[in-house]
């Protein structure tokens, strides 16, 4: 599923090393929570890991195939809220991506179900829009710098 040699910081934005964050889930270990599964699925989108995305999608709602060619260049993930109760879970997140010379976002309220000890993505309610960062806002590219000294200059 996933090569062992990977960059140090996890793409999911947790701040943890990839090897201690999402990599174990992408290598086949079951994610312990809906939030961990959501973060690992985001990482799989960043890495174009279709196999993992399909394997963690519940069979009742999973598409027969998934094409990621032409998908956005994902830059950051923000978990707004996550909860679980028994074998059900929800994660509300916002993911930012680059669109040519601009920025966009995907916000989703995702539903998860646990079966036989594994969490699966079930479905989500999404909204998308254009992101217009201000000059003094943190740059959406994930650099941590102000937009005016980072991507606004490009």
Image (cartoon, rainbow, N blue to C red):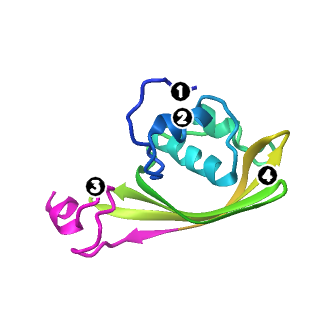
- Determine the image quadrant of residue 7: top left
User: How much space separates mark 3 and mark 4, taking CA atoms?
Assistant: 34 Å
> The magenta stretch spans which residues?
128-154
Instruction: Determine which of the numbered discs, if any, sits on residue 2 in the image.
Output: 1
Circle nearer the N terminus (3, 4): 4
Q: Residue at x 44, y 45 (%)?
A: 11
Q: Residue at x 35, y 63 (%)?
A: 103
Report which residue position mark 3 lands on: 143
Report which residue position mark 2 lands on: 23
Measured from the top left, where is residue 14 in percent x and y? 48, 52
Q: Which residue is drawn at 55% across and 39% down?
A: 67
- Determine the image quadrant of residue 35: bottom right
Label 3–label 4 contact, CB within 8 A = no
Circle nearer the N terminus (3, 2): 2
**Badge 1 local density, few (<14 within 10 Å), some, or many (20+)?**
some
Circle nearer the N terminus (1, 2): 1
């Amino acid at each position: 599923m996933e090569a062992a040699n990977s960059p140090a910081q996890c793409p999911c934005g947790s701040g943890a090393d990839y090897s201690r964050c999402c990599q174990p889930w992408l290598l086949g270990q079951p994610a312990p929570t809906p939030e961990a599964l959501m973060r690992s699925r985001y990482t799989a989108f960043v890495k174009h890991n279709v196999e993992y995305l399909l394997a963690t999608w519940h069979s009742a709602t999973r598409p027969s195939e998934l094409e990621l060619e032409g998908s956005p260049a994902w830059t950051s993930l923000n978990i707004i809220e996550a909860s679980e109760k028994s074998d059900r879970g929800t994660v509300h997140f916002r993911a930012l991506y680059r669109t040519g010379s601009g920025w966009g976002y995907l916000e989703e309220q995702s539903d998860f179900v646990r079966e036989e000890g594994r969490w699966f993505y079930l479905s989500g309610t999404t909204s998308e829009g254009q992101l217009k960062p201000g000059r003094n806002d943190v740059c959406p590219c994930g650099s941590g710098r102000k937009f005016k000294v980072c991507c606004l200059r490009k």
